[in-house]
Amino acid sequence: MTSWQTRAQAALALVAFGVVGAVGYTLRPREARLAPAVLERLDPKATIETRGGDVIQLKGSRQDARIEFESQVTYDTGETKLIGVKVSVDNRAGRSYTITGKEARVGEDQTSYDLQGDVKLETNDGLTAFSEQATYADAENIVKAPGPVRFTRGRMSGTGIGFTYDEQRDTLWLLDQAVIHVAPEGTSGPMDVMAGAFGFARTDRYMRFERTMHMDREGQTIDANEAVVHLFTDRDEPDLIELRGDSRVSGGTGMGALQSMSARDMNLDYRDDGRSLQQATLAGQSAIQLAGKGGASGQALEGEFLEISLAPDGSVSSLSSRQNVTVTLPATRDTAARTIRSNVLTATGGAQGLSAMNFTEGVNYTEAATRTQGARVARAQSLVAALDPAAGTLQEATFTGTFQFADGPLTATSNLAKYRIGAGTLALSGKQGTADPQIKDEALTIEATTIDVTLNPRRMVATGKVRSALLPPGKSAGAAGPGKRPGLLSDQDPVQIIAESLTYDEVQRRGEYQGQAVLLQGQTQINADSLTIDESKGDLIAVGKVITSLAILRKNATAGTPSPATIGRSGSFTYTDQGRRATYLTAATLDGETGNLRAEKIEIVLAPEENSLSRLEAIDKVTALVDKRTVTGARLSYVPADEKYVVNGAPVTMVDADCQELSGKTLTFFKASDRVQVDGNDEIRTQTKGGGKCAPTPK
């Protein structure tokens, strides 16, 4: 059999086998077919339903987002709803997060989702947010939740109404009724914040609070219309807090010496611990309250702008303010409250408190009244204040430029003034233009190169070209009551006194003038090396090269007619008002209507009611030249009522114009007549000599 025959037989065999197989299959018994199971519809309105699945979005060659779901339904409108959905967004700018919910409606573009029911957002750095509804649009990369929401991240948690999470900016917002809580950890205490809205920019490291913020932070309260809290890069602790609108801060250990602050706007710069305040900047009606001794309120400062720097121990190291500055120093048991106003302030301090304050551009100083003193007011161009740091009180105030001071009826002016609070003294110096320092009260005025005033009890020391005026006596506000002017002087006019120095004691009503003193009032003038006026007694003392010019009234003089001056010279001059007696001592001379008198002592006694002569006495080495009669003796008495002179001595001598000499133990003569009585008293022979040349008049 040939090979092709062999192949043909094999092919026929295969065909036959195939035919037999087909016939056998056709003739086999038929099996019963089962009906397919009926699936429960998720939504009868759906056109497509899918059980389980996920969608992967790719950007380039990498996965960008994955949407997983338990089931899916699609409607003829093209809308798709996912049940049991989970949206995973991976590695967008280094951030990944997931959003889960009971169901989600997918937009027509398949890139937006509206999630509802137990919505939860989780980020790879620990942020978790919960709400009942949320939307996500891939084009915006923003998760939005319109209703109540709560979130947690590390120590921070919060609740609010309305929520957004910006994926690209990594920013979280609570849109309304935000309540934030930061739990304590280690040495960091808790923080609670309420605001109209809250934003948390996690990458940019700041939190923002809007529509009235209130923060409680470790015993400190912070309020403002809006606030931005800048966080440290490595932790959620404040590095800088910016407050805007009705800003207020009070309490808290991190404030150090600051008890409270308020302003329109405020910046708070913290140290690395995030709690200790390092610097505060306040703008707009700014005010701060410093802590005083024992935790009580201390100094208070106000100004349009304020800048405060705090040392690590919490003390104020420096402070500055400008525009409408007001500083209030509190009262203590020993000092009155003080208020200082100016346009510019700088201050420095240390661990104990502020130690110095410099005020410039118009200073107004007010010291409150106490039970022992009245209110005091001062004005100047600038003020340097030295403080007691521990007590917060003023120790010394140095005023410069057009200084003006008022303490009840006392006023003072100068260019420079040092007010020493503890000593209660005021030192004036420096000219204002051409004017020397000046003091004025109800009793006197003083102008001098320098004036030092002890305010209570009042005492004044003036040096250098002193010009003072004793004012007419009146009702006095001082402790000593009204003064009693020496009777030599008129009560109606001021008494001008010039000297090189003056010490005036208000309580004693005593003024001591030293160095070429000159007293002037009308026709009255007194010159001496020193002059003392005691207005408590009405006494006057002049010492050293005394020259007086007294307006002693003439007997029976016509009213308004000026009296001739009575000129006196001596080593000293004393007037005592009790006896209305003026006494010249040491080489005394007196020239006037009584004649020319010389003696070691001359006394003038004035009438009780007026400055007319009641009696005159000259004692020791007396020489009198009266109407061309020269009398010498040991004692002379003159009574103006009958113009009688009585001279005693051993002997008394008289030489008249004709050189006739009389002598005896007692000699009496009368000014208006030639009548002379000589009484020898049987002890010395009475002599009368005539003729000869007259001896020169003694000088």
Image (tube, rainbow, N blue to C red):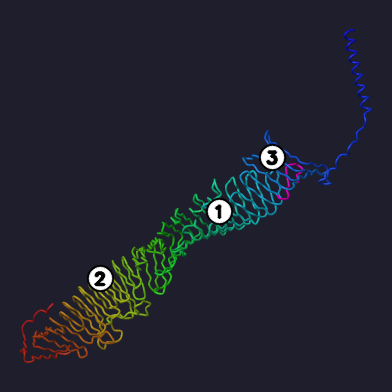
Q: Where residue 20 appears, x then y in whole percent? A: 92, 22
The span picked out in magenta is 105-118
Q: Where residue 63 appears, x then y in whole percent? A: 68, 36
- Lower sequence index among marks 3 and 1: 3
Query: SS class of the residue under badge 2?
Result: strand
Q: Nearer the viewer, residue 181 or 482?
A: 181
Badge 3 crowding class, 10 Å Cα cut-off, few under 14, some 14 to 19, many 20 or more, is many
- Mark 2 and mark 1: span between their CA atoms? 76 Å
**Is 83 situated left or right of 173 in this image?**
right
**Is 408 situated left or right of 535 in this image?**
right
Q: Nearer the viewer, residue 180 or 203?
A: 180
Q: Where residue 225 appears, x then y in whole percent? A: 59, 58
Write down the residue under mark 2.
514
Amino acid type, callout 3: Ala
- Mark 2 and mark 3: span between their CA atoms? 103 Å
Magenta span includes 634: no
Instruction: Give the vertical position of 428 relative to 603 (above or below).
Output: above
Amino acid type, callout 2: Gln
Badge 1 crowding class, 10 Å Cα cut-off, few under 14, some 14 to 19, many 20 or more, is few
Write down the residue under mark 3.
65
- Lower sequence index among marks 2 and 1: 1
Badge 2 crowding class, 10 Å Cα cut-off, few under 14, some 14 to 19, many 20 or more, is many
Q: Where residue 457 appears, x then y in whole percent? A: 34, 73
Q: Nearer the viewer, mark 2 or mark 3?
A: 3
**Is 658 situated left or right of 98 in this image?**
left
Image-quadrant location for residue 333: bottom left
Q: Which of the image's four quarters has the C terminus? A: bottom left
Instruction: Give the vertical position of 286 relative to 532 (above or below).
Output: above
Write down the residue under mark 1.
184
- Lower sequence index among marks 2 and 3: 3
Q: Nearer the viewer, mark 2 or mark 1?
A: 1
